[in-house]
Amino acid sequence: MSSTDATIDSIQTVAELEERIRNGDTTITPAMLDDAERAEKWVRLQDEAAARAQQHAQAAESVAATEQLHADFARLGGADSTAARKAYAKLVAAVAELHTELDAVAHQRTELSRRAADLDIVLQLDDLGRVAALTSDEYVGYAIREAAGDYLGGLNNPHALHSDKQVAASAERQEAAAAAEEARRAKEFENSESVVDVGFGNYRRIHV
């Protein structure tokens, strides 16, 4: 029930008074009708004032929330992004350095390959395995995957720019995997058997 209803219920409404007059009630005076009309109007105005105050409060809350949201985005794009911007600047510098160093390596690799050709020497894996031969973009792609934990030397195969420690760890993983596979095959062999026909309808199971 609204405040209008509560107040009007405490007195008789204009409609009720008018209906009583129509029914022959001679006790209703013009002053009673005027009082009822003024009361109804006053209560309606009070309800409208309360509704308008609520609208203003909601609008103020919306403005405050909007301003806070903009402030939060400003902070995120400002101070909270400082570390990321510094990291990006370091990344740009590192990629630029990588370009420069790979160009130098490529130049030396070409020169050494030319010398090998002049000497009629076939280059071996030991010669080329630790010499970078990919583009900087390819190495950056590997770095992105490695930083995300998605790449570590591929299938136990480090690339030329991995550290000696990573290469050694890769070799250990390969040896462990080979040993595990050999053990698995040995176990499989121990558990295997075959049926041999020894003649006269006789068969014998033997391990193979």
Image (tube, rainbow, N blue to C red):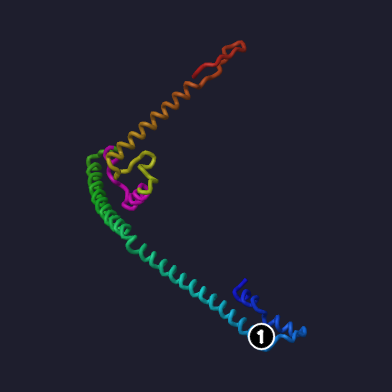
Assess whether residue 131 is covered by the magenta stretch: yes
**Magenta segment main secondary structure:** helix
Kind of element beneath mark 1 = helix
Using the rendered view, name the quadrant where residue 162 is placed. top left
Assess whether residue 137 is covered by the magenta stretch: yes
Using the rendered view, name the quadrant where residue 82 is placed. bottom left
Quadrant housing the N terminus: bottom right
Tell which residue pokes out farthest to the top in this image. 200
Task: Name the residue located 32 percent from the left edge and 37 percent from the top edge.
Answer: 169
Tell which residue pokes out farthest to the front in this image. 27
Nearest the eye: 61 or 74: 61
Identify the residue under disc 1: 32
Q: Does 172 appear above or below 29?
A: above
Using the rendered view, name the quadrant where residue 120 is placed. top left
Q: Does 69 appear above or below 136?
A: below
Q: Position of residue 123 (x, y in %)?
A: 27, 39
Nearest the eye: 152 or 206: 152
Tell which residue pokes out farthest to the bottom in this image. 30
Query: 164 left or right of 55?
Result: left
Q: Position of residue 103 (x, y in %)?
A: 26, 52
Nearest the eye: 191 or 195: 191
Q: Is residue 122 visible?
A: no
Tell me which segment is drawn in magenta.
Answer: 126-146
